[in-house]
Amino acid sequence: MKMYNSFYIIILCFILLLINCKKKESPTDDTVPPPANTNDFAYMNCEITDFDNTNGQLVLGFFDSQVEWDKSVDGLAYRDYVVDVTSDPLIIFMDTLPAGVYAIKLYHDENSNNECDMNLLGIPTEKFGFSNNPSIGLSGEPSYDECKFIISLNDTANITIDLIG
């Protein structure tokens, strides 16, 4: 009798497996979004200057909102870029961006430890910078409003950031 119960349990599990693994139907043509027009984007050339050396990498955070900027801890940027420093100036091309308002913060990670190294007072020991090159005072990091810029649809913005530190 136990053999029959085991057999029925195996058959029941097999049927449940078949039901749950039913092939999903492909969407109909009216539910598939049309392909994006490749011309409906904005682009940006970002030139970073004033490197002391070509050691390590440049870590760049590209922000599209005040909220992201204010909460910026690694990983909250709209887009992150990590690029080997090979020259001064270093030029980074960003493509397929939606038109909009953006701001950039970056640092030269000379020792490639994926952090902006600080001294005991919390002052960066590696060079850093922001879009629009705002002056840095005792108040610390500039605001999103000081660093923001607009990129229009089908246009290329040219941004130059001078490293500080």
Image (cartoon, rainbow, N blue to C red):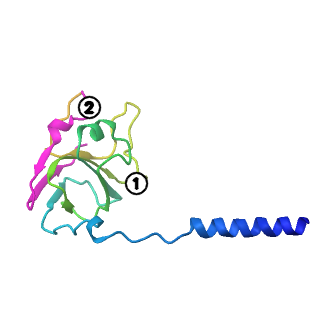
Secondary element at image label 2 = loop
User: Marks 2 and 1: which is nearer the front?
Assistant: 2
Label number found at residue 52:
none
Q: Mark 1 highlights which residue?
A: 111
- Relative vertical location of residue 70 with respect to residue 149 in this rendering, above or below: above
Please state the extent of the stretch shown in magenta in the rendering.
139-165
Residue 159 in the magenta stretch? The answer is: yes
Q: Mark 2 highlights which residue?
A: 140
Q: Residue at x 15, y 49 (%)?
A: 100
Give the amino acid at mark 1: Asn
Q: Residue at x 46, y 69 (%)?
A: 24
- Seen from the viewer's position, the closer of residues 84 and 23 is 23
Total numbered labels: 2
Quadrant where the N terminus sits is bottom right
Q: Position of residue 103 (x, y in %)?
A: 20, 45
User: Pointer 2: residues within 10 angstroms few (<14), some, or many (20+)?
Assistant: few
Alpha carbons under labels 2 and 1: distance apart: 23 Å
Residue 143 in the magenta stretch? The answer is: yes
Q: Position of residue 48 (x, y in %)?
A: 19, 55
Q: Residue at x 35, y 54 (%)?
A: 110
- Seen from the viewer's position, the closer of residues 5 and 118 is 5
Secondary element at image label 1 = loop
- Seen from the viewer's position, the closer of residues 159 and 95 is 95
Q: Indicate the quadrant where residue 36 lies.
A: bottom left
User: Pointer 1: residues within 10 angstroms few (<14), some, or many (20+)?
Assistant: few
Give the amino acid at mark 2: Gly
